[in-house]
Amino acid sequence: MEKHEISIERISYPMPCSIVGVKVNGKPNFLTVAWFSMVNFKPPYIGIALNTIHYTNPGIQESGTFSVNIPSSDMVEITDYCGIVSGRKYDKAKSFEIFYGKLKTAPMIQECPYNLECKLIQTVKLVSNELYIGEIVAAYSDEQYLTNGIPDMKKVNPIVLSMPDTKYFKVGEYLGQAREIGKKLISKKD
Ligand SMILES: Cc1cc2nc3c(=O)[nH]c(=O)nc-3n(C[C@H](O)[C@H](O)[C@H](O)COP(=O)(O)O)c2cc1C
């Protein structure tokens, strides 16, 4: 079958949605971020790619901290809202119950099932974006979202963003256990 060459813009597909929390000018602010990923195993580092135009960015440099909060699917409207209005004009923090952890300066969202508290390690300046790499110093969740002490994706029920058509989805069906299901093929190929 012949491949079609398609647009190279916004190719990440699909992506989980987060709401990043930062103190800006001494006040908590939140913005939606889909471009985030683990970038180091030990110690655990997470990277968030923010456009340089955002109100939030100077707050990360100033406080040296940020949080990554994972909203559940029933928070889709507020997640979208945090991604379409700026802290320059709107007080997004008043939509949430906020708590602080060990670092004291990274605002986190109580309503989100899963919260990561991060200390800024490195800023990589790219062309239109800045990649903020933070060490995860603590992770928080509620009993109702855990199975055997770890966040359970079915219970957390995260939001997935499809790109480049910018549509929100829930996570679909379980396929199998990673690093297990492929083992069947090892003996076949050897
Ligand atoms: C679903 C969604 C995902 C987004 N992901 C990112 C992202 O990964 N990086 C980014 O810089 N902006 C992203 N944005 C845009 C910012 O969240 C948005 O511009 C926000 O209003 C900036 O807030 P601030 O001005 O208060 O900093 C996203 C927006 C939406 C709706």
Image (spheres, rainbow, N blue to C red):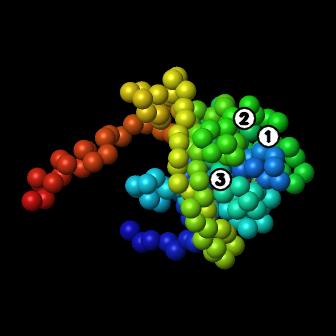
Give residue 77's position: percent from left, percent from top: 73, 38
**Mark 1 Cα-neighbour bin, 10 Å: few <14, some 14–19, many ≥20:** some
Q: Are marks 2 and 3 in contact (CB under 8 Å)?
A: no
Asked whether the beta carbons under mark 2 and mark 1 sit within 8 Å of each other, the answer is: yes
Residue picked out by circle 2: 98
Picture disc at residue 93:
1
Is the residue 136 above or below the residue 4 in the image? Answer: above
- Disc 2 or 3, which lies upstream in sequence? 3
Kindly identify the amino acid type of the residue bearing the numbered disc 3. Answer: Thr
Estimate the x, y position of residue 44 in percent, counting from the top left. 46, 53
- Quadrant including the N terminus: bottom left
Nearest the camera: 161 or 75? Answer: 75
Label 1 residue SS: helix
Q: Which residue is mark 3?
A: 65
Numbered circle sitting on residue 133:
none
The image position of residue 129, as x and y in percent, is 67, 69
Q: Secondary structure at mark 3?
A: strand
Q: Earlier along the polypeptide chain: callout 2 or callout 1? A: 1
Residue type of the residue flagged with mark 2: Ile
Mark-to-mark CA distance, 2 and 3: 15 Å
